[in-house]
Amino acid sequence: MRTLTTITAAALSLLVAGTASAAGTEQPLDPANADDQLRIQVKMSCSLVEGTPTLYWWSGRVWARVPGEPNRLLFNVHGMNMRQCRVKQDPVRGFCYRSVSREVMFYLDPVTNEVARRWKSPWSGEEVDVVHVANDPVNARDWYCSRDKDGKPVDRSDNLSFKDDLLLEGGGAARLFYKSPLAGEYQDYVGGTYHAMEFGTSAASAVEALDAGDSELQDTLISWVRISRWLPWMKMGDRDGLVVFHTAGMRLDSWEQLPEVVRREVDTRYPSYKAPPPLDDLRPNETSWTVFKKFIDERRAKESPSN
């Protein structure tokens, strides 16, 4: 595969020329230009037209990986993310954008493919409530800009690869390691950190990506993988083992294209997730761990003798 750092000038010029021919007379985006690199990413993630709602969907499986045991299929999953972006042109930092979104992901029984409500651990034998992913919001914490605070271009070409008519984005990993929201006062002695890795990859038409007349990439494909410790609602404590999420998905044109099981669950239990948060949303982000903490705190409050 030829990345932007190694693609020949002749090959890139042919690609750009083909884009210009397909797009008409408008100058195509330049993948070697820091501003255009970020515009390409915005087109893939959401839209250059500020406030355009963008819907992504993915599906896959969740596996358990325990030392000394064969991998075990735990769930099928369906997820969706509804987002929109703000864009601006800063006199020093160049082209900038910030995304706001909310997302759900449902754990499905691997046999019936219906939304799971209860789960019995094959290891502990305990049956627990399934707490689905319902993160509102999942926002960019700050603006992403094409230049740093001193006006120097930020080169993101390592995240972009071209192969024939395909643009690929990815190759990095989110390496997550921080104190768990469920940690107590003595976790420095007994543990209590959230430790995971997430991998995301996107693919789209290179010609459409470089077309300055297109504000978004409708046919974007995605892949998402996460490797982490047991999910908190599984009540597995410090038992050895990992959970592995492996999914693939795409950008959708409309709500009606989502699988029926997702539409039914969102309509019934999460109707606000059918629209993204407001563009000026500054709330702290939610994760599966913070959502589960609220779930446990609310249940404990209801079970308290004072109630």
Image (tube, helix red, strand yellow):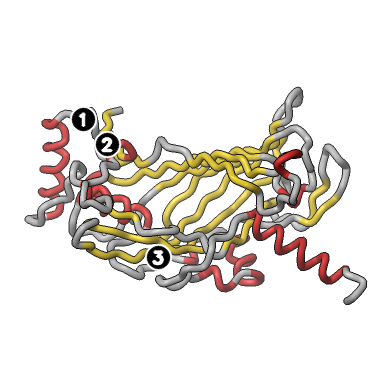
Q: Mark 2 near mark 1, Cβ–Cβ under 8 Å?
A: yes
Q: Secondary structure at mark 3?
A: strand
Alpha-carbon distance for marks 2 and 3?
Answer: 26 Å
Q: Label 2: which residue?
A: 162
Location of residue 276 with respect to 122 vertically, above or below: below
Earlier residue among tags 2 and 3: 3
Q: Residue furthest bottom?
A: 307
Q: Residue 294: in sight, yes or no? A: yes
Q: Label 3: which residue?
A: 84
Q: Label 1: which residue?
A: 7
Q: Nearer the viewer, residue 26 or 9?
A: 9
Q: Residue furthest left?
A: 25
- Label 2 crowding class (10 Å Cα cut-off): few <14, some 14-19, many 20+? many
Q: Residue furthest top?
A: 68
- Label 1 crowding class (10 Å Cα cut-off): few <14, some 14-19, many 20+? some
Please provide percent x and percent y for residue 224. Answer: 50, 43
Location of residue 117 with respect to 21 vertically, above or below: below
Earlier residue among tags 3 and 1: 1
Q: State left or right for residue 20 relative to residue 87.
A: left
Please provide percent x and percent y for residue 29. Answer: 17, 50
Alpha-carbon distance for marks 3 and 1?
Answer: 32 Å
Q: Residue 276: in sight, yes or no? A: no
> Which of the image's four quarters has the C terminus?
bottom right
Q: Residue at x 55, y 39 (%)?
A: 197
Q: Nearer the viewer, residue 189 or 111?
A: 189
Q: Residue at x 25, y 51 (%)?
A: 147
Q: State left or right for residue 83 relative to residue 197.
A: left
